[in-house]
Structure formats: structure tokens, C-alpha cells
Image: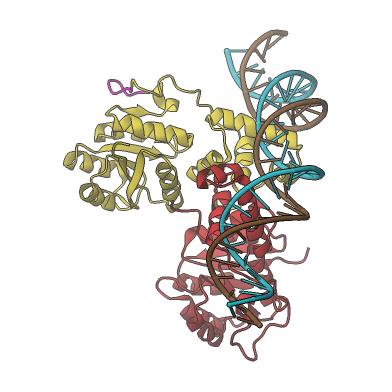
Chain colours: A yellow, B red, C cyan, D brown
Amino acid sequence: MEKKLKILIAEDHKTVREGVKLLVNAQPDMEVIGEADNGEDAIADAKRLDPDVIIMDISMPHVNGLQAAKRIRASCPRIKILTLTRHTDDGYLQQLIAAGANGYVLKQSAPSELIKAIRTVADGNAYMDPALTNRVMGGYATRSASLRGENKQQLTDRESEVLRLIALGYSNKEIGVNLDLSVKTIEAHKANAMRKLGISSRIDIVRYAILQEWMQDT
Amino acid sequence: MEKKLKILIAEDHKTVREGVKLLVNAQPDMEVIGEADNGEDAIADAKRLDPDVIIMDISMPHVNGLQAAKRIRASCPRIKILTLTRHTDDGYLQQLIAAGANGYVLKQSAPSELIKAIRTVADGNAYMDPALTNRVMGGYATRSASLRGENKQQLTDRESEVLRLIALGYSNKEIGVNLDLSVKTIEAHKANAMRKLGISSRIDIVRYAILQEWMQDT
DNA sequence: AAAATTTATAGGGAAAAACCCTAATGGACG
DNA sequence: CGTCCATTAGGGTTTTTCCCTATAAATTTT
């Protein structure tokens, strides 16, 4: 095995941070070497730890991801920056590109998307979530993966609800009783949701749920 | 349904806080009405929200659980305080009783233990985790549940490992492959662990794992 | 030291759950 | 008004889990 990709996670939400770490460390060729919960620490850690890729949430306390990206770009141009965000905030998109981010992944994407994105930016290509590919980004567009993008439909409310309960450890039957639906219906929603996300196991559902910050309240 | 028990959670670790909230809100007769991540806020919230029971971690920033318990006892004697802690820290035990805590639950106990404890202290009885009952606590001993304590053995490393992976969404087979053991062995560890904890479903495993703060790293 | 208990391992067979395929209904949208 | 797709669900097969039993090794007790 050649050297592992060194990843730094900059994300203020601990649950997501730990979920991402879990996911990344599960890849044989990647390794989380540091974590920061604010932009300032992210800048310091970037210099100190010299990661290959920084996974950075754009909304963070103190110094936000945008500012942090700009400063890291300036001081450590070698380091690739992959931004991670909740919504399709158009506003940030162009600013981030300008700030020097190498990629842009939505939190609502499947975990496999994030892994693909890491590999893509580590290879020196820009990466844009398929759900955004048909938007702006003139000359930077990624040529590698993601363009032939697995249709990235949104999950319906029911589908999200079912996946969340599955991640929490409920069986299809228990969910059926809970929501007063047939097991068969739960199975259908689950299967449809998994197809949409391109995932195929319960761990993937758990990982997706963690990324969604679904493991809380209710 | 008579009025629900109002619960305040004072715990600095967010994952645990959310896990406990999940568990408590799943009870038809309980409701989380507030959360605090430090002792100071816990004291303020106790006065402001007037909960029936406070579930309080003893190690918290600013003002620790011990100090907070003492002050809440003084200002709101009606409110029951149930302390939640990681280890069998003998040291704290007597201090907590002196500070006015009504109960003491270990984090390594099954979630059902916590629920039982809430009901017991809400009823005006003292509660002590069965694992500790055979220790100190002269005149305060609980007479209600818990004394006829389900044998509270510790999980072995293997058992913990298996439960953790199950909580993360792995199937027995996947765990077997992962640890290079037969599925049958995994099943046995799982069954033994569940028997020890007195639980019987995957959700219970997930809840237990959250209480253990197992859903992180690795 | 011998005996008893617990841990780690695992098989066989029954029961339960999940999976794959198919399908009807009722909106939304062009 | 026809097409897409969300929501609902059944039939039959495959996979997983559950329950009971078992053995060697380590640990604890007597």
C-alpha cells in the first residue's frame, strides 16, 4: 500500500465530525490526522499537520470556512480544500471557488460521494457535487468522476423518516408499527431511498444519517 | 394520561445528551424540557424550568455536578437530582449523597436502568445503581426497585466490541468478516452481552452505545 | 491444586426479517 | 390526459437472526 491520504476535518458540529472521521478511517487509503472545530484552528492545523485534503464545513465559528479556505490557499497552496455544506447555498458557491476551494460536497449526498470527492481533489481535480454540476463553475469543472453523475434526486420525507429510524436501530417491522404502515411499505421506502443514494447496507444508512445530523432529537 | 414528568438534562457531552433525550422522550410519561451543558446553566435552568427530575453528569465544565447539585438542592428542594456518571468513582459517591443527590446511575448500565431510576427518584425514593448497592449508603438505601438487582456484570471486551459494531449498523455477518470470526461467535457474544444488560432489541443496543459514547472514533 | 465459572469459539435447525419483483392508487406537471 | 413518481402493499425467495447446545481455554473460587 502506498502512503495514505492525510485528511484534516474542520467542522464545528461534533457529531458530523466524528461521523466523517468514521467514514474516512474506514477507507484503506485514507486517514484522519486531525480535527478542528473552528476556522482559526483549521488554519493552524493545516500548517502544523500538512494534510493532503481538508474537509471543511463552510459555517464555523470564529473564522468561517470561506475565510479559512482563502488563508490556507495562500499559505499552503499544496493542500486541497473540499468544502462540505448543508444546503445548496448558491451564494457561497462562487465565493468558495474564488477562495480556492477544490471541491464542494453537499451534506445530503451519500457518504460514497464524499469519499469520491476526496479522491478527486487529492488527484488535483476539482470536484462538484453532481446536484450542482449543472450550475455555474466555468473553467473549473471536474472532468473525472461525478460528471457522469448518478442521478442525485432528493429523498422524500417518508424516505428520510424511514432511513432515520433504521439508522436508530429499528427494524422494518417496528417502523411499520410505529408509523402504522405495512412492513412492505417500509421496505419499499427503504429500497427506494437506498437506490437514490446509491448505497446498499445498513452501515451506509447509519453513516448517511450521521452526516444528516439525524441521530439527534425526537 | 396524568401529567408527564418534566426532565432537565445537564450533561456536557452532546452525544450523550441527545441520546438520553431520545430515550426519555420515547417514554410516554416523560418529557425533556431543557438541556444544559454546564453546571451554571443547569442551576439557572432548574429555577427557570422547574423540572421534576434533573439528570446530571457529575463532571461538567464551569460548575461541576457536585456543586450544582448542592446549590439546586438549596434553592429548589422539590427537584429530584439523579446523577449520571461514567465510572464507579467511590470518591464522589458520598459527597453526592451529602450534596443532596437522590440517585446515582452508572453510564455503563442499560438504558432501562436509567428510566427506572428516573421513576424511582420522581416517586421520592433514593435510587442507587445495583452495581453499587452493596456499597456504602447507610440510611438512604432505596427500597423500591433495583435492590433485587439484575446481576450487573461487566461486558467483556469482545462483547463491547460486537455491540458497538452492531450499533454502528453492521450485520452479524459483516462483523464476523471484519473480526475474522464465525457469525455464530458474533451471535453468541451479542446474545451474552444483551443478556447481561437485560436488553432485547437493536434500538436498545444503539441507545446503550450512545450512552457509552461509542458512536465515535475508530 | 482441584473445581467451578466465565469467556471465546462455533454448529444445527427454526423463526424472523429483509430482499426482489410486481402493482395499484392518487397527485403534480407538462 | 398522459407521464412521472410518491405512497401504499402483496407473494415468494433469500438472508439474517434467534434459540439451544457444545468445547477448549482462561479465570476465579474453594
Q: Is residue A188 left or right of residue B156?
A: right
Residue B54 in sight here: yes
| Magenta region includes residue A137 | yes
Which quadrant would the N terminus of chain A be assigned to in this image? top left
Q: Residue at x 50, y 85 (%)?
A: B95
x and y percentages locating residue B137 in the rendered image: 60, 87
x and y percentages locating residue B106 in the rendered image: 57, 71
| Residue at the limit of the structure toward the left, as seen here | A75
Q: Is residue A130 left or right of residue A205?
A: left
| Residue at the limit of the structure toward the bottom, as seen here | B139
Rendered position, A194 above or below D29? above
Q: Residue at x 33, y 32 (%)?
A: A103
Quarter-of-image position of residue A177: top right
| Magenta region includes residue A107 | no
Magenta-colored span: A136-142
x and y percentages locating residue D30 in the rendered image: 66, 82
Dominant SS in magenta? loop
Q: Residue at x 29, y 37 (%)?
A: A81
Rendered position, D2 above or below B106? above
Q: Is B209 or B155 nearer to us in this picture?
A: B155
Quarter-of-image position of residue A104: top left
Q: Is A14 or B107 nearer to us in this picture?
A: B107
Q: Is B37 or B113 nearer to us in this picture?
A: B113
